Image (cartoon, grey):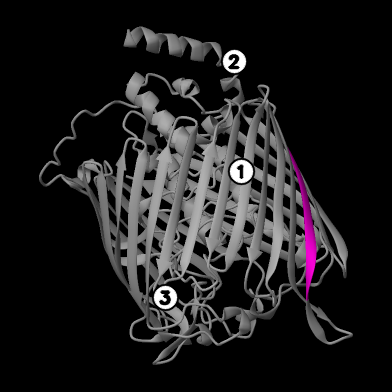
């Protein structure tokens, strides 16, 4: 009976292939467009987005086998909701083993757009019922290895090199080596030097930054053991989250923070990681994660006090060197998670100290309640309950001083074509969590109360309408806002997906907020409201399987009592891929016309592997680039990019040590990858 039912479902799926899968294209560019939508949120930290891009790029290169994919692995894909993950795993359990990738269409709640995002990350492979033992003395022979070398540089000379303020050459250099044996044993090492940092001279006897990780998995009840650099995320992130956090994006109902636990860190991000040992124990319905870390930080500090942490990772000038590794953090903690049927509960606790120094930022009115002292402690209870058409997720946390932070999310599916999300957050103005990061308007889990609702509706077969509204209050002052304030943030998006060759997207975004404004004639600073209106239209169309195009138009308006300023840009992209596995050529040409930083426009553009690119346009000019991927041989792939911005309204680009004399700024990127 089970076999007959499965054959019937596959047959039904094949009937809908022309109508549904004709709208699905298994190209890497689709999930990159999803990241573009995430990056459109100006509150999202670019470093965290780069981490996410790095991680997703790695998964694309090392796809998950749907026959044995785990819940934890699927949770690393941010476009999948909790309900979609549960439905996918249930389908595999009930009707598996899968015989064809097209069976994804039969999974309840997996729409064609989500499947399009998913395809580059998964494949239908063989089932390995029993792992083979590692042959003695032939360990490396059975593992997969990867080596990457990358460089990029700016053709024009910057002021920092002209006046010798930068201690090194203008080249970015990095390497990454990784080994993987069936995900049971992994190790990796990477090294990086930024432009302007010296290499093999002065204080550096090699690369400026190194990352290392060694991971063991499936060691009996010890599910995972990691040494070296790693990242952590538990609950909703109120206590611990150094991974990417979903914010307010066009994926309006996917706001839940994923409990991804312990993750490897071998990327070139120099701030958002731990250094030490972490492990995961699993028995029955219970998972216990424990971690210890001791690492140095860049900071403005002396022998007794830390004023501020420096997180950009640059060590190009003598002033940068004075701040290099002048602070230390020691962190210990754990998370216990229990789940049975529809109910899940978890408890996270962490203690951290600052190497005997006192964290004491220079006192300002807005930072009166910032974290201060020689140490800190946080604990949080996360909870969840899930039914077929609704689920509830949340976390409530407390810091060392007893201050509270809490976020609670409710997700509904009242009818088959509608998803609805509600979220309420309360972060006390004096709550402090050094490693906390969760859903919010600002970048910290502090001094904010907010109410959010988002809805996604499938209109007929090809149309999708999404919208959200968020009301937020800052009970105390914030940096750049010298009074308590409030605001509104809203988005409406309409998508049309005709087939795999034609899609359109229209998005409108509105924000009302306040900020400090200097009134020159009165020589005073006032807190005044402002509004931002953003329109974006995208048209994706393909002539055939080889040649495709994307046209994008952006129009922004910044409006306040003292000015009203519009901005616009238009971008034409093209992709030529006669054989995607061996050769692909992408390029774009854009014209932009903006007033100042308030009306800036951010546009995602393709880049070489593991490199995230999201340039900011302001002023007037042209932006153009071309990216080439060439698989020279089966184990050897070459990536090359040339990108340039030509300004029409200035003779000098940027300022300070980054100043360039002239109208043109051109960057060259190069990466070579060798698998063996």
Residue corresponding to mark 3: 401
CB within 8 Å, label 2 to label 3: no
| Mark 2 neighbour density, 10 Å: few (under 14) some (14–19) many (20 or more) | few
- Which dot marks residue 252? 1
Query: Between tags 3 and 1, which lies in front?
Result: 3
Name the element at disc 2.
Answer: loop
Left or right placement of residue 517 versus residue 543 in this view: right
Q: Earlier in the sequence, mark 2 or mark 3?
A: 2
Q: For this view, does 339 lie left or right of residue 421? A: left
Q: What element carries label 3?
A: loop
- Percent across and percent down for residue 66 are 37, 30
Could you give the CA–CA distance between mark 3 and mark 1, rounded to whole angstroms? 34 Å
Residue carrying label 2:
18
In the picture, measured across the screen, residue 72 lies left or right of residue 597, that is left
Q: Can residue 35 be seen in this view?
A: yes
Give the image location of residue 111, x and y in percent.
Answer: 56, 28
Quarter the N terminus occupies: top left
Magenta residues span 527-538
676, 102: nearer the viewer: 102
């Amino acid at each position: 009976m089970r076999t007959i039912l499965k054959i019937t479902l596959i047959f039904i799926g094949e009937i809908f292939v022309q109508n549904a899968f004709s709208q699905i294209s298994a190209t890497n560019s689709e999930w990159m467009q999803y990241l573009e939508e995430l990056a459109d949120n100006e509150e999202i930290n670019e470093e965290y987005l780069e981490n996410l891009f790095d991680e997703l790029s790695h998964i694309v290169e090392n796809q998950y086998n749907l026959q044995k994919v785990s819940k934890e692995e699927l949770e690393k894909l941010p476009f999948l909701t909790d309900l979609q993950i549960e439905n996918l795993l249930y389908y595999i359990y009930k009707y598996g083993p899968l015989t064809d990738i097209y069976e994804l269409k039969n999974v309840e709640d997996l729409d064609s757009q989500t499947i399009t995002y998913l395809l580059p990350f998964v494949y239908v492979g063989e089932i390995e019922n029993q792992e083979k033992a590692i042959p003695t003395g032939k360990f490396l022979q059975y593992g997969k290895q990867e080596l990457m070398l990358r460089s990029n540089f700016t053709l024009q000379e910057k002021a920092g090199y002209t006046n010798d303020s930068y201690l090194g050459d203008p080249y970015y250099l990095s390497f990454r080596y990784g080994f993987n044996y069936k995900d049971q044993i992994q190790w990796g090492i990477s090294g990086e030097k930024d432009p302007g940092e010296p290499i093999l001279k002065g204080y550096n006897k090699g690369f400026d930054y190194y990352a290392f990780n060694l991971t063991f998995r499936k060691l009996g009840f010890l599910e995972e053991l990691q040494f070296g650099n790693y990242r952590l995320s538990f609950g909703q992130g109120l206590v611990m989250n150094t991974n990417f956090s979903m914010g307010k994006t066009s994926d309006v109902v996917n706001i839940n923070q994923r409990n991804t636990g312990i993750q490897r860190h071998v990327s070139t991000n120099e701030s958002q990681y731990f250094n030490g040992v972490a492990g995961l124990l699993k028995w029955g319905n219970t998972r216990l994660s424990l971690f210890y870390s001791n690492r140095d930080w860049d900071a403005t500090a002396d022998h007794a006090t830390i004023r501020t942490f420096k997180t950009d990772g640059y060590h190009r000038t003598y002033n940068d060197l004075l701040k290099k590794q002048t602070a230390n953090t020691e962190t210990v903690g754990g998370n216990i998670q229990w789940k049975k049927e529809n109910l899940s509960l978890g408890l996270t606790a962490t203690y951290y100290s600052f190497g005997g120094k006192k964290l004491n930022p220079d006192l300002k009115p807005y930072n009166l309640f910032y974290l201060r002292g020689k140490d800190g402690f946080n604990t949080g209870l996360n909870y969840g309950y899930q039914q077929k058409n609704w689920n509830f997720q949340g976390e409530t946390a407390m810091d060392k001083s007893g201050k509270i932070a809490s976020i609670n999310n409710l997700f509904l599916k009242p009818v088959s074509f509608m998803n609805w999300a509600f979220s309420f957050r309360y972060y006390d103005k004096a709550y402090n969590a050094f490693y906390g990061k969760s859903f919010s308007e600002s970048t910290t889990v502090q001094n904010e109360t907010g109410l959010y609702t988002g809805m996604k509706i499938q209109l007929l077969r090809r149309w999708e309408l999404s919208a959200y509204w968020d009301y937020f209050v800052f009970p105390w002052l914030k940096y750049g806002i010298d009074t308590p304030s409030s605001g509104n943030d809203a988005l409406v998006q309409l998508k049309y997906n005709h087939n795999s060759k034609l899609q359109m997207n229209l998005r409108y975004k509105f924000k009302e907020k306040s900020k400090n404004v200097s009134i020159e004639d009165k020589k005073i600073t006032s807190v005044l409201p402002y509004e931002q209106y953003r329109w974006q239209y995208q048209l994706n169309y393909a002539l055939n399987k080889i040649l495709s195009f994307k046209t994008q138009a952006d129009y922004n308006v910044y409006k306040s009592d003292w000015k009203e300023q519009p901005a616009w840009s238009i971008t034409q992209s093209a992709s030529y891929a006669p054989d995607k596995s061996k050769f692909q050529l992408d390029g774009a040409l854009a014209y932009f016309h903006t007033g100042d930083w308030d009306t800036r426009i951010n546009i995602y553009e393709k880049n070489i592997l593991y490199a995230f690119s999201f340039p900011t346009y302001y002023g007037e000019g042209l932006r153009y680039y071309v990216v080439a991927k060439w698989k020279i041989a089966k184990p050897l792939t070459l990536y090359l990019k040339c990108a340039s911005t030509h300004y029409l309204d200035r003779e000098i680009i940027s300022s300070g040590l980054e100043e360039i004399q002239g109208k043109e700024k051109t960057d060259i990127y190069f990466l070579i990858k060798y698998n063996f």
